[in-house]
Amino acid sequence: MEFFLFLLFLTFFCLVTAVIVYYVKILFFSAKTNYRREELTDIRGDVFRICLDVLESGGNLVYGVVSFLGAALFVWLWSLLGSLLGEKGPGAFEHIFHIPIFFLAVFFSFPFLKEAYKGERTLKLVKPVLSGLALGNLSAGAVHYGLDRDLFFLFYLLLLLLQIPILVFLWNREPIFGMSFEESPSAFYESEDDWGSPTSSADPATNNDWEAEEDGPFTNEADDFGLGDDPFPDEFK
């Protein structure tokens, strides 16, 4: 039962993080200023694409999934030690074994790992490993908090505020504290043209159309009934 809840929360936090990543991308990291309605409402495909991008780090889906699930399960098993050593309810052991020490250790040691394993494909697995450690920690904490109230709510809230923002930068391929975990290619859900923007077109002639007054459908027709013309003959007056 507890393991099933852990997997359920792991899936839930993965999808929620992907949603946050998507909206942060288009609102803050994107150069776009105008959006279609579908870009803000129909995001299911983009959310699954973001999750798949995390698991496909390094170009191999199998290695990515194994790294992600292995890191998440490791953190979950580590959190069980707090329940074994401590008593039911919030305690010192519970909180100590839920501190994301492995996540922080891998995160802050990445510059040294990058230098030591420079050019090796194994280094690209850091992204799914970090994601698994973070989401596994949050999922294990949610299970222990929901079932036995083993954690204080403020402590669990701190875990959320500490790890989710880092994942947002990591999944968006943006530098974090000056560290770049991945190259930042063109976004996978960002179109090149800014919807409705006059500066999005590469043709300068089309940009002038925005500044010119828009012609109506009857602009080129002869004005037979203008203000200076009387449509009624004199015999009807």
Image: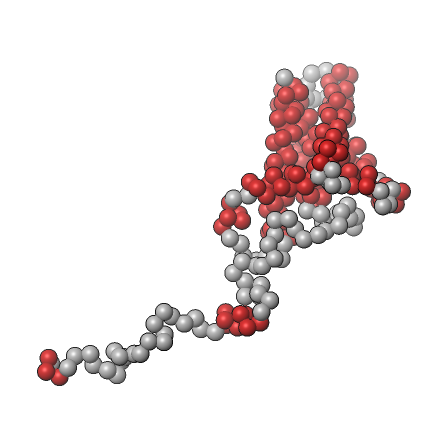
Point out the residue furthest to the right here. 116
Report whether 200 appears left or right of 218. right
Numbered disc total: 0
Q: Position of residue 127 (x, y in %)?
A: 75, 39
- Quadrant where the image shows the N terminus: top right
Corner quadrant of residue 70: top right
Q: How is the image coloured?
A: secondary structure
Query: Split into 4 quadrants, where in the image is the C terminus?
Result: bottom left
Q: Is residue 152 visible?
A: no
Which residue appears at 53% of the width and 70% of the height?
206
- Nearer to us in this view, 130 or 231: 231
- Give how far across and how far down residue 27 sits, in percent: 60, 51
Residue at 73% x, 33% y is 62
Measuring from the top left, give residue 115's x and y in whole percent. Answer: 88, 45
Residue 43 visible? The answer is yes
Residue at x 67% of width, y 53% of height: 186
Q: Is residue 96 left or right of residue 221?
A: right
Q: Name the foreground residue: 25 vs 50.
A: 50
Drawn side of residue 135 relative to residue 198, left or right:
right
Reply above or below: 109 against 186.
Answer: above
Q: Is residue 46 above or below residue 156?
A: below
Residue in the picture at 65% in, 51% down = 187
Which quarter of the figure has residue 201?
bottom right
Q: Quadrant of residue 14?
A: top right
Q: State the residue in front, 116 or 60.
A: 60
Give coordinates of residue 86: x percent, y percent.
75, 17
